[in-house]
Image (cartoon, grey):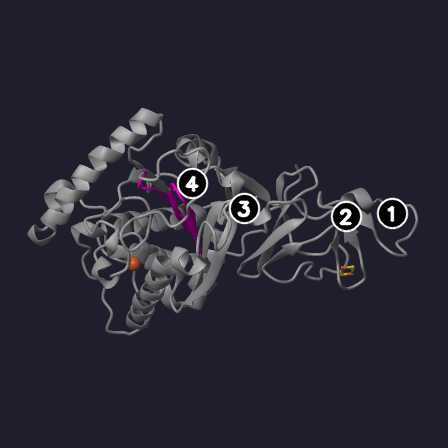
Amino acid sequence: MTLTPSAPSSLSDVDRARLLDVLDARSPGRPLPGAAYTDEALHRLDLELIWQRQWVFVGSVAEVREPGDYVTVELGTVSVLVLRDDDEQVAAFRNVCRHRGARLVEGPRGSVGNIVCGYHRWTYGTDGLLRHAPQLAAGTDTSCLGLRRVAVRVVGGLVFVCLAADPPRDVDAVAEVVEPYLTPHALDRTKVAAQVDLVEDGNWKLTMENNRECYHCEGHPDLLRTFFPTWGLEDHQVPPRLRAAHDRYLLAEADLALACDERGIPHRLVEDLVDRPLGFRIAREALDGLGESFSRDGSRLVRRLLGDLDEPRLGRVTFHAQPNVWVHALADHVVTFAALPLGADRTLVRTTWLVHEEAEEGVDYDVESLTEVWRHTNEEDAVFVGLTQRGVADPAYEPGPYTEPERQVDAFVTWYVDRMREEASR
Ligand code: FES
Ligand SMILES: [Fe+2]
């Protein structure tokens, strides 16, 4: 496979010194200094060192089910076209014409037979090869005028791309751990039931940090109907007021372990958040109430279960990977979340609900009920992220100490600092 050569690093000595100043100013156990969330030059370094060098989640196979189906993703000035090719493989290309550089495909999603540039009609196959270029001089070698490929990797139905010429290799090790958790949910036999784009007025790191703790979960009344508020806490960290909920959680976890063991489905926590480029965490965790889905009483929201699952009460696979994805896979549906930076202080959160490909809207599920909990939860989170962005931009901001429930936030920030240092030193 020919990959796009990495752009030569534009990191000047001034940029590097500024970045190291900010990273050095971060104390362990505390958030980053304000500039890390607000400074435009540092944001450009985030794009270059994280978003253009690490594996980034762009969607699931359900979004590109048929040959020609595509989605586009913008990472700063870079646009990536992800599509299902005619051999039914997921491929990714730079969304830039090889003639005079026009953006090839506009809009977030669609379907094409060939990829036709809107400017002078150069036409590429779904394999990226140049098929037709009107009036191009006879004898021109078109084999070197194909679209630039981008590395793509499908992990349990989740699609990741990496813009680097030599992508971090740990994606294989992560896939080996993660795929057995997701395989029972058969994402390759799902379809998109709904997708909602929400713009949070905050830096992408604040979006990810907010997602890594349930310290603020009392701000999510709908979610707390089924989500245990002691999420992420060790037994000894549970405060007295949450003890009853935690006891319910322990019982539900024991039931879940039995149901999984009977079916040979993995459920134990695997967490490797800091020490690898594709830091991740995965587990199957119980839900409160009836324990089946994110509904008001915990009952399922989709009548048709995913894959060959025979039991609705299987809690949720909770998967998180850095820099930009978290996923809940339940017996009846899957919700994926992609965080994508739009600017230093704006982040797109794209939420996608997947159901069995044969589930019928209006018969097996209702989109309003299916999406209710996470639509509300995302809107509540957007408020928290927006408030934080405004606060960290205030000169009065000083990073305060994390509490025990924020252990994963600390891990995310440490991962970020380590990655930035490592990439800046190349
Ligand atoms: S820029 Fe695409 S065909 Fe000319
Ligand atoms: Fe939240």
| Pointer 4 or 2: first along the chain | 2
| Pointer 2 or 3: first along the chain | 3
Q: Which residue is mark 2?
A: 145
Q: Residue at x 6, y 51 (%)?
A: 240
Residue found at the far front of this picture: 363
The reply to whether discs 1 and 2 touch (Cβ–Cβ < 8 Å) is yes
Q: Nearer the viewer, mark 1 or mark 3?
A: 3
Which x, y percent locates residue 401?
A: 18, 57
| Pointer 1 or 4: first along the chain | 1
Which x, y percent locates residue 424?
A: 44, 50
Which x, y percent locates residue 97?
A: 72, 56
Whether residue 52 appears in magenta in the rendering, the answer is no
Amino acid type at circle 3 is Ala
Q: Quadrant of residue 74?
A: bottom right
Query: Which residues lie in the magenta part?
Result: 314-339
The reply to whether discs 4 and 2 touch (Cβ–Cβ < 8 Å) is no
Left or right? Give the position of 120 relative to 249. Answer: right
Amino acid type at circle 2 is Leu
How far apart are the two marked residues, 1 and 2, measured between alpha carbons? Answer: 10 Å
Q: Which residue is mark 4?
A: 305
Which numbered marker is on residue 62?
A: 3
